[in-house]
Amino acid sequence: MLGLPTQTLEELISSVREIIYLNPEHISLYSLILEEKTLLFEKVKDGKLKLIDEELERKMYWKTNKLLKQSGFNHYEISNFAKEGFESKHNINCWQQNEYLGFGVAAHSYIQNKRFSNITNLEEYIDNIVNNQFDKNRTIEEIQDKQAKAKEYMLLGFRILRGISISEFERKFGINPLFYFRFEISKLEGEKLIEVDLDNIRLTKKGIDFANFVFEEFV
């Protein structure tokens, strides 16, 4: 976790080296996000704790990135690093917009251009099953048309460091993304947030730091 209050770069490096020593197969690296109604949120809000500044947080990210790469971890997704062959299959499946089914309370699914989730109340969930009212357990969150699906494909694809395959986009949607999203891509290239090669559109190093600005173009 990056950005903890009072955390120094030296403390972070020490922690990362300890984690590397444990030799895990996969490491997820996220910047701290304050959640409302938590003790940490209230302490920061009341001025009892102060978060580190954004510049230091970015230094922490790239220093950790360097240490993990030097230790044999592949930086395959913005927030994830893995030893060869241990990349998260679930994450990659989601970022490639493949279908999946979730089972049980609060589970999420994506199939046939529909995103839906199951209700979160366990007793109600069980009662609906007992009474053969399975549809009551499901909440439809989104039904995608072609444009919405194409935008989401781009947004999700940018989370993977290798980016979006132009040929795969063409196979899936029947059109070249460089044409379909020509205005968005031109803007982002001009801002040096993305780069295009023969078959991929991917984030630059600057784009990784400002990934949310890239994502916003496809919301």
Image: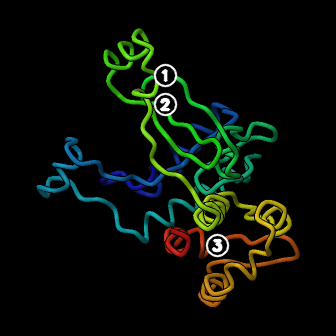
Whether pointer 2 and pointer 3 mark residues with C-beta atoms closer than 8 Å, the reply is: no
Does label 1 or label 3 sit earlier along the sequence?
1
Q: Are the residues tagged 1 and 3 within 8 Å (C-beta)?
A: no
Q: Which residue is tagged 1?
A: 104
Label pair 1/2, CB-CB below 8 angstroms:
yes
| CA distance for labels 1 and 3 | 39 Å
Identity of the residue drawn at 41% across and 27% down? 137
Left or right: 45 in relation to 147: left
Image mark count: 3
The dot on residue 160 is none
Which residue, as the protein is rendered here, is positioned at the far bottom?
190
Residue 173, given in percent of the width and then of the height, sits at 76, 64
Q: Which residue is mark 2?
A: 107
Residue 205 falls in image quadrant: bottom right
Q: Which mark is residue 205?
A: 3
Say what amino acid the circle numbered 1 marks: Gly
Distance from disc 1 to disc 2, alpha carbons, whole Å, reads: 6 Å
Report the amino acid beneath label 3. Answer: Lys
